[in-house]
Image: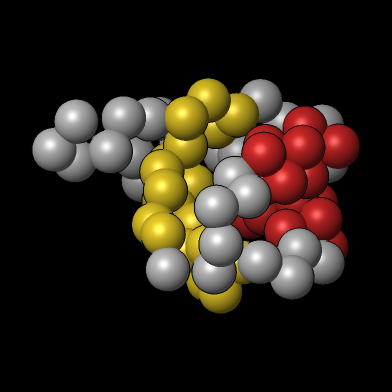
Amino acid sequence: MKKLRYKTNINCNGCIKSVSPFLNDLENIDLWKVDLENPDKILEVTLEDENESAVVEAVKKAGFEIERMPSDGQ
C-alpha cells in the first residue's frame, strides 16, 4: 500500500460528489478522502499499487486541478 497526498481545488461537498464516481471507479484505490478544512484541499489516497497517474487522470477528468505533494521524509 502506498499513501499519497495531493493539493487540489476540490473545495466543497458538491465537488466531492462530482469527483467520487471517477475515484471510486479506480480499482487500485483502497481509500481516499479530501480535507476540506485544509487551505490546500488535500486529497489523501491509499493505493494498492504504484499507478498514481490513474488518480491524477481521474481527478482531471472530473474537472479539478491536482498537484502531487512531497511525501513525508522526502
Q: Residue furthest left?
A: 73
Look at the picture and state if 65 lies above or below 1: above
Left or right side of 31 for 65: right
What residue is rendered at 67% in x and 54% in y? 16
Quadrant where the N terminus is found in the figure: bottom left
Q: Position of residue 54 (x, y in %)?
A: 72, 46
Residue at 66% in and 25% down: 65
Query: What is the x, y in percent for residue 57?
Result: 77, 37
Query: Residue visible at 13% across and 38% down?
Result: 73
Which of these two is toward me, 2 or 13? Answer: 2
Report the label total.
0
Along the line of sight, the residue nearer the viewer: 50 or 37? 50
Q: Residue at left 49%, top 47%?
A: 43
Residue 58 position by quadrant: top right
Residue 21 is at least partly visible in this image: yes
Task: Look at the picture and state if 42 lies above or below 19.
Answer: above
Where residue 47 appears, as percent x and y from the top left, is: 53, 62
With 67 as the anchor, is 16 left or right in this view?
A: right
Colour mapping used in the image: secondary structure
- In this view of the protein, can residue 59 be seen by the observer? no
Quadrant in the rendering for residue 2? bottom left
**Image check: 59 left or right of 9?**
right
In the image, residue 49 sits, relative to residue 68, either above or below, namely below
Q: Nearer the viewer, residue 9 or 57?
A: 57
Image quadrant containing the C terminus: top left
